[in-house]
Image (cartoon, rainbow, N blue to C red):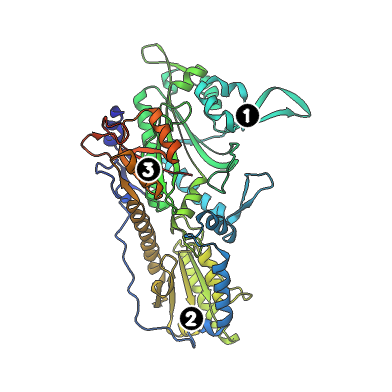
Amino acid sequence: MAGLRSPARGMAMALSSSCGSRLTPSLTFFPSAGTKCASRLRTTATLTQESEKRKVKGGAGGGKAQGQKQQGQNQKRSEEAVTPRSKDFSKWYLDVIEKAELADYGPVRGTMVIRPYGYAIWEAIQTWLDARFKETGHSNMYFPQLIPYSFIEKEASHVEGFSPELALVTIGGGKELEERLVVRPTSETIVNHMFAQWVQSHRDLPILINQWANVHRWEMRTRPFVRTLEFLWQEGHTAHSTPEEAEEEAMKMIRVYECFAVEEAAIPVVTGRKSKLETFAGAVHTYTIEAMMGDRRALQAGTSHNLGQNFARAFETQFTDENGDLEYVWQTSWGMSTRMVGGIIMTHGDDTGLTFPPRVAPIQAVVVPIWKTPEEKEAVLEMAGQIHDLLKSAAVRVKLDASEQKTPGWKYNHWEMKGVPIRIEIGPRDVEKKAVVVARRDVPGKAGKTFGVPAVGLDSYVKDLLQQIQDSLLAKATAFRDSNIVDVKSYEDLKSAILEGKWARGYWSGSDYDEALVKEQTGATIRCFPFAQPSAAGVCLMTGNPASEIAIFAKSY
């Protein structure tokens, strides 16, 4: 295990991306989340709130006169519609997905229908990742969804790991098939079947490809976005002429996932290596990003696998090297799925509903016009339209909610439920003052409102505020994570930490049996051996033997 430290901690992978000029592992012991991709992250600034209070009559406050009683009733119904997170996190999660119209249940148990608002989040993930993949030299392609069962059987540990989750096709065209077909659970086998045909010489390498696809795994316990029978993902597959190239590739791609989680999703992940028992079936090493959800369970949010030559040997994927010798290729595979959508929900949401980091929010700002009379309506809508167009021209994803069937209070609750980062209120007095009211989703109530923001220059103001919200959500999630990780020195300490619902971090050199025992007795698993390790060795919390690495244990999804 010690041999992995050098590439994990010393290798720098250049990426021309929003993460800055380089992605480099941190050398500090358990650093704050922003250290990997800190080029665009700034210290969160708090907006100065004006001391002037809003009057009920006129201005955006005129909306209160527009059905104040009904607004209170709407607010009460909204609060009752979502189970509080602190009361029942699981029920809250399902309530939020339903009320925010992210997804619905499919007709087959364990499947889901991703609704437009939910799919827009996946599109944001796709867009960012796809650009990074292409910047790092990868090309998109597509492999068939149906895979011969004999392919799965070729790699022993692979079939053993996936066999309980396979969905099989046995009849086609009304006839029994000569060979059963597997509905794609992952594509390493069929990819290798094709690589064996494409690779002849070292000149054919490296192969760097990615595919956007759906996969099927027959899960027994399902949860929308987090674990379903069918889900969407990307899976990258590469082939190399040396083990060093394959290791560099696997490390580079886990850093890409880390950068997306921190910079775009505002999720402070712990990046590291999986234990042997938690390694992907058929891989030599698996690298992971682990995120702490709002209930303190861990979520494996992305993985990158160094496959060594395991699949190459099973499928005879060989090449002639520069000396004319026949060698097996070295391979990697890596993926991120719609599970990340669930991670964003569970990291940032609150009792009111969703809270989206601006960079992945389908709608970044909503404009809510407020009026009472036809004359006010005309003037307010004109200004609201101008504000909408101004923000749209500044590349802000903005929506104008000029519907007349709902009260302003209902609209406030509705867009808060859907996690829109910024709400802009415009009433008659705002038109007179050429100013607006701006409310932040991440700061509830009056504390999150700023009054009298000039309409002139609002585009710059909103863009700066979006960055502040992005930074604030990351800082909040990081503080929550760090306050819920306990350093432990004994197995009793570990059990106590897990019993409290926290993560346990301590030195580990236990056996596979010891690791399995921890899982059996506590329900926790080794989430990873973090890349950021202390400089000194220690004593294993389980056995008392010398240990060179710390591991993190937690219950997980």
Badge 2 element: loop
User: Which-is-in-front pick, marks 1 and 3?
Assistant: 3
Q: Picture coordinates of residue 319 (x, y %)?
A: 44, 17
**Which residue is rendered at x = 39% and y = 45% of the image?**
498
In the picture of the structure, the residue carrying the numbered disc 2 is 60
Asked if the residues shown at circle 2 and circle 1 are in contact, with their CB atoms under 8 angstroms apart, the answer is no
Q: Picture coordinates of residue 555 (x, y %)?
A: 44, 44
Whether residue 496 is situated above or below residue 1 in the rendered picture:
below
Q: Amino acid at mark 1?
A: Val
Sequence-wise, the earlier of marks 1 and 3 is: 1
In the picture of the structure, the residue carrying the numbered disc 3 is 495
**Which residue is rendered at x = 66% and y = 44% of the image?**
109
How much space separates mark 2 and mark 1, taking CA atoms?
A: 59 Å
Q: Picture coordinates of residue 334 (x, y %)?
A: 45, 35
Sequence-wise, the earlier of marks 2 and 3 is: 2
Q: Is residue 134 visible?
A: no
How much space separates mark 1 and mark 3, taking CA atoms?
A: 40 Å
Identify the image quadrant of residue 434: bottom left
In the picture of the structure, the residue carrying the numbered disc 1 is 182
Q: Amino acid at mark 2?
A: Ala
Badge 1 element: strand
User: Which-is-in-front pick, marks 2 and 1?
Assistant: 1
Q: Picture coordinates of residue 91 (x, y %)?
A: 55, 56
Asked if the residues shown at circle 1 and circle 3 are in contact, with their CB atoms under 8 angstroms apart, the answer is no
Q: Is residue 390 visible?
A: yes
Q: Amino acid at mark 3?
A: Lys
Using a 10 Å C-alpha cutoff, classify the residue at mark 1 as few (fewer than 14 neighbours), some (14 to 19) or many (20 or more).
Answer: many
